[in-house]
Every structure is written in C-alpha cells, then in structure tokens.
Amino acid sequence: MPAGASAGAKAAACGRRPGRRERSMSGLRKPLTIARGIALMLNIVIGAGILALPGLAVKQVGDHAFLAWILCALASLPLLGVFIVMGRRYPDAGGIAHYAMIGFGRRGYTVASFLLLGAVLFGLPSIALTGGHYLSGVTGLPPFASGLLLLALATAMHMAPSALVSRVNALMAVVITVAIVLLALAGALLANSGEGAAHVPSLLPETLEPARVALPFMMLFFAFTGWEMAANTAEEFSNPRRDFPIAMLASFALTVSIYLVIAFATQRLGLDAGFETAFVDIARVSLGASGGMAVAWLAGAIILANLAGAIWAVSRMLYSLSREGILPAFVRTTRGGSPWLAVGMTSLALASVLCASGAGLFRLDWMLALAGQNFLILYGIAALSFLRIARNAAEVLLAVLAGALAAYLVVAHGLAPAYPLALVVVALLVAGACRPAPARPTPPEEVRGSA
C-alpha cells in the first residue's frame, strides 16, 4: 500500500476529505514525459474504427468526405481546449470528474465519476469485441474470446511498473502509427497509378455542398473523442503545467494527420463497393492478397493499444475515487507506481460485460450507444465546470462553444435517459453516504505536481 494510504483512509473514516499533505503522498509516480504522453494519448484516441470510417464517409457523401473529416477536427477544438486548460491547472488522476468537483463540489465529482465509469463499462468491452471480430478470422476463436485475449494482454501490461508501461505504450504507438501511415500512403500513391491515373477521384468537390459536408458528422465525430480519458493521466506527467498541454495538442495534431492520410488514400481508390473494408483494399495495393491478413493483425494491435491506454485512464479514476474516500483505501494500492488493484478491478468488470455480450445478453450497438451518450453528457459537465471558473472573456467564450457543441451532440445522438439518470441517483446516494467536510477547490495558481 502506498505511503499515505493509511492516513487517507483514516481521514475518510473520520468523515472528512483527505488533506493536502495526505493527497500529496500519492502512490502514483510521474513517468510521463511529453513524448510518452503523446504516445499514450494516441493509443487512447485512435481505435480500429479508423480502418472503416473513411470508407463509410465516402459511401455517404462521396467527394465531400475529406472536408467532413476537417469539419469534425475543427468542431472538436473547443472541447479539446477545455480539457487542456483544466488539465494544466488541475492535474489530477480524477480527470474530468475532478473538473466537476472544481465546478460543482463533491456531488459533482461523484456524479461525473459514475457517468464515466458507466460509459467505459460498456464502451471498452465493445472496443475489445470489435478487435475480436477482426482477429477471429486469423485466430479461429469466437469474437468475444479474441476480445478477452486482447483485454488480458492489455491488463498484463499494467502489472509492470508505470515507467515500463509508459515505454511500452510509446513503442506500440510508434509501430502502429508508422504501419498505418505507410500502408495508407503506399495505397494512395500506387492506386490508379497505371492506366487509370487520369481518372483519379478528386480530393475536393467541384461544387461545395455544405449540407453534404455535415451529413456524416455524428458518425465521424466519435473518432475525435478520447481526450476526456487522457485527462486522467495529467497527474503522472513530470511537469503537467508545461507538458500536459503540449502532449494534448501534439497528439491531436498527429491524430488528425493520420485520419486525413487515410481519408486521402480512401478517396483516391474510387470505390464502388466494399466501403466498410476500404482499408483492406488500401493494404492490398501494396501487399497483394495478404493485405486482408495484415489489416486484421493491425486492427488487433490498434485495439490492444487502445485498451491498454484506456485501462491506464480508468484505473486512475478508481484510484482517485479511493483517494477521495468514495472507494476503500486498498484500491489505491500501488506497485512500481501502477495501481495494480485498480487495474485488476477494471479488467474484471470489463471481462464480465464482455462475457455477457458473448452470451448474447448485450448487443454491440446497444453498448456503444449507452457509452456514447454518457461521454456526451460528460462533455457538457466539463464545459459547465470550466464556465464556472473561467478567468476572462476568452475562457468564457471557449466554455460556451464547448457547451453548445456538447448540447448539439446530445440532441443529435439522441438520449435514452434511464441509464444516466440511474447512475446519477446512485452517485448522489453514495455522495450522501460519505460525508467528508466540504473542501475548497485547489486554487488555479496552486497546481499540484508541477515541477
């Protein structure tokens, strides 16, 4: 158990929030440099959907698809800005839930925590299941079994010290990024390079139709989410005030670049069919018949990295809940800076849902819908929290833009209120049962963990 765990437990037992000295004795280490942080964020954000979404966008809007990707990237900037500013000022393992505490107190923190956990409870198993579908053709295992294998591998990574895990994450991010970019560029350059070169599809439309550009917005926007999970990593940067914003901006720029490269390659193919498997066609341009196999393994690697990054973030959320007295003190037991018990709890919960899905209890589309709506609600909470502590007119404008985007996304996505409302009720009951004395939010000038 980390130093300070017993003191924090005593504070919780006495009905008060652990004090600043107790909180500073964190068992989490600070293994994240700018480069490692960028790699971790890339792993969190980039999912296997990137292999299918460009083709689906071309199917939906044709030569307007490339512009649709650019629109989604620009639209996500206000939310990214909120997470950057809040993470820089308040680097905490609680991430978006900690921002809710800054804006709305302990109840806000607990509600946001439960909404986040409710999102990943179904969202991450659906990601693992997607990877299982890709790998089932090469492993011979059922999709849910292949998904369990990916989840087990991602969990095993986190049994190592956090410094080693951060290095492995960096290596995975480099290998996956290079593989995606090389395959996409090779496909783009070699496609239509022969007799059909004169008929290469245009990257941009001859006549711009704004309505068509906006049509695939909701489908593509979820490819630009994940930085809300990256917020949980801020506390583990060696200098979060300086490094966290750089890592966020750099990972965003790299992610957008990767997406645009694949969108460019897909549009150059001039597809008439097989839109869902467009990346397989891209790979076959340079790899021939083995392109399908290569894409299956690449998708598995992307999902493995995605799960590893997400487990890092979610386990830190559980660590934060323990530190705030919501979960028992033993949850924040660490080894080598990694909260391995929180990692194990995370993996066990995800595996249970994955097995239930394999038994036919949960449908993949249903799980994705529940997870998606919770994340959209959390974006609104983050924007409102930022609005409450905004220092100047520019920050107020940023908060309003982010809040307006979150509201639009909730309306466009549709809301099934029973699930988030149930989580809110449970969160309020838990917050009421644990009654530490109110604690003032850490002032913006006092950034914990800054070097």
Image (spheres, grey):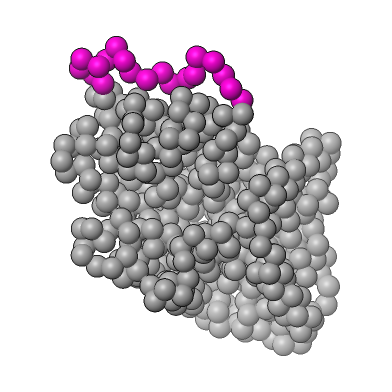
Can you see residue 214?
A: yes
Task: Residue at 48%, 35% (x, y): give it.
Answer: 60
Classified by dominant secondary structure, the portion drawn in magenta counts as loop
For residue 425: magenta?
Answer: no
Up/down of 192 relative to 422, above or below: above
> Residue 228, position in %: x, y?
60, 53
Task: Residue at 61%, 25% (x, y): give it.
Answer: 210
Say which of 259 and 107 sits in front: 259
> Residue 401, position in %: x, y?
74, 39
> Residue 214, position in %: x, y?
60, 33
> Residue 359, position in %: x, y?
39, 76
For residue 206: magenta?
Answer: yes
Position of 439 with respect to 359 (left or right) is right
Quadrant of residue 192 in the image? top left
Task: Residue at 63%, 51% (x, y): give it.
Answer: 413
Up/down of 10 relative to 238, above or below: below
Which region of the structure is painted magenta?
192-210
Quadrant of residue 281 in the image? top left
Can you see residue 171?
A: no
Outermost residue to the top: 198
Outermost residue to the front: 272
Up/down of 158 relative to 378, above or below: below
Say which of 258 and 338 sits in front: 258
Q: How many marks?
A: 0
Say which of 282 and 9 sits in front: 282
Task: Residue at 66%, 47% (x, y): give it.
Answer: 412
